[in-house]
Amino acid sequence: MHGDPTFDRAVIIVAEHNEKGALGFIINKPFHRKFNELVEFKNSIAFPLWMGGPVKKEELFFLHQRPDLVANGKPVTGNVYFGGNFQQAVQYMNDKTLKGNDVKLFIGYCGWDDHELEDEIAEGTWIPVDTPLQTVFSTDTEYLWTLLYQSLKVPS
């Protein structure tokens, strides 16, 4: 991971964490293509995609905050859910019931083996930060890392 530009100024939400390890998504790096530019979804709307991480970059993953519309999502924190019925999500994205502040689509994910994330936090590679949940679904992410990092600084 060290020296990997994928993680430069990356803000990551951890969506799963258990005895096997952790899985998360970079929430502040837009992907260079839109959802409808993927061959399988060429008839869909131009929905933003995000670079979730370097693992399984040929697969789509998603977070949402609409369990009332998208069934079977796994609770992450607050009103953030990981995955669920993807066909429902696509249908609601296409009819504009789900907006960019309701769902975030990721190409790939970040993964850590058992205790790897804890070790990286202990060595200072990652700094855990509590952030407002709306940050997860924000589309205005250009300065997100800077704002979160600055929030850690103690005023002199």
Image (cartoon, grey):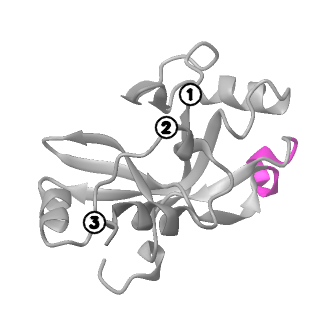
Q: Position of residue 66 (x, y in %)?
A: 60, 22
Disc assigned to residue 81: none
Of the two numbered discs 3 and 1 on the same chain, state the one appearing first in sequence. Answer: 1
Circle 1 sits in a helix, a strand or a loop, which is it? Answer: loop
Q: Position of residue 21 (x, y in %)?
A: 20, 49
Instruction: Report the front residue among 103 and 101.
Output: 101
Q: Quadrant of residue 45?
A: top right
Q: Is 6 positioned to the left or the right of 49 in the image?
A: left
User: Most extreme residue toward the front, as rendered?
Assistant: 156
Q: Amino acid at mark 3?
A: Trp
Q: Amino acid at mark 1?
A: Gln
Of the two numbered discs 2 and 3 on the same chain, state the one appearing first in sequence. Answer: 3
Q: Main secondary structure of the magenta part?
A: helix
The span from disc 2 to disc 1 (Cα, nearest Å) is 10 Å
Q: Is residue 25 visible?
A: yes
Disc assigned to residue 133: 2
Q: Residue at x 67, y 28 (%)?
A: 89
How many residues crowd around disc 3 within 10 Å: few (fewer than 14), some, or many (20 or more)?
A: some
Q: Is residue 54 visible?
A: no
Q: Amino acid at mark 2?
A: Leu
Tell whether label 1 touches label 2 (CB within 8 Å). yes
**Label 3 sits on residue:** 126
The span from disc 2 to disc 3 (Cα, nearest Å) is 19 Å
Disc assigned to residue 65: 1
The span from disc 3 to disc 1 (Cα, nearest Å) is 25 Å
Residue 23 in magenta stretch? no
Which segment did they paint magenta?
36-43
